Amino acid sequence: MKENIKHRLLFVCHGNICRSPMAEFVMKKLVEEAGLETQFEIASAATSTDEIGNPVYPPAKQKLAEHNIGCEDKTARQITREDFEKYDLVVVMDGNNLRNLERMFGHAYRNKTKLLMDFTPHPHDVADPWYTRDFETTWRDVLAGCTALLHVLTEK
């Protein structure tokens, strides 16, 4: 089955408990609904070590559940250099995440790193619900970004 994979995506945010797991599981759902699950490998990771091993933050998990998306076994992990070798595209949630990746790994992987909302007609940072507690805005950003990303990847 691995030989059918055309797209390997890694979503990244600061802690890997809110935005990036939301994007991971939204994208998995969109890919499944499109009947393309054999063509994609999708995961998420953090730039920090703050939340390693912790599950998806309960309000983020609840927001996914409202849309019939589960994330039960997901725990936070930090991105590694090996991830840049494995994944075709590292999709980050905001400019701070991008700067953190460049601080961690230099500019060597810049061509594999994109902001999620840059795939939409209205580029901006994905709202961070850790600070705002506004998980609905984050949901809308993630859904719009993942929908646009899937369109870009499947139209090529």
Image: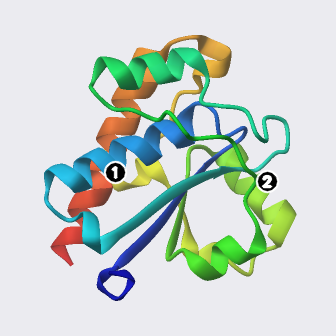
Q: Is residue 16 left or right of residue 139?
A: right
Residue kind at label 1, given as amino acid type:
Lys
Q: Quadrant of residue 3?
A: bottom left
**In this rendering, does residue 125 appear at all?**
no
Q: Secondary structure at mark 2?
A: helix
Colouring mode (rainbow / by chain / secondary structure / one colour): rainbow
Percent position of residue 91, x then y: 52, 58
Give the residue drawn at x 20%, y 65%: 36
The furthest residue to the top: 133
Give the mark toward the camera: 2 or 1.
Answer: 1
Which residue is labeled 2 in the image? 100
Earlier residue among tags 2 and 1: 1
Q: Quadrant of residue 65?
A: top left
The quadrant in which the N terminus is found is bottom left
The quadrant in which the C terminus is found is bottom left
C-alpha distance separating marks 2 and 1: 25 Å
Give the residue drawn at x 45%, y 26%: 138
Q: Residues within 10 Å of mark 1 (few under 14, many from 20)?
A: many
Percent position of residue 74, x then y: 57, 41
Residue 28 - label: 1
Residue kind at label 2, given as amino acid type:
Asn
Above or below — where is 68 with respect to 78? above
Percent position of residue 53, x then y: 76, 39
Give the residue drawn at x 79%, y 53%: 100
Q: Residues within 10 Å of mark 2 (few under 14, many from 20)?
A: some
**In this rendering, does residue 82 appear at all?**
yes
Percent position of residue 61, x then y: 49, 23
Give the residue drawn at x 50%, y 33%: 72
Q: Nearer the viewer, residue 17 or 151?
A: 17
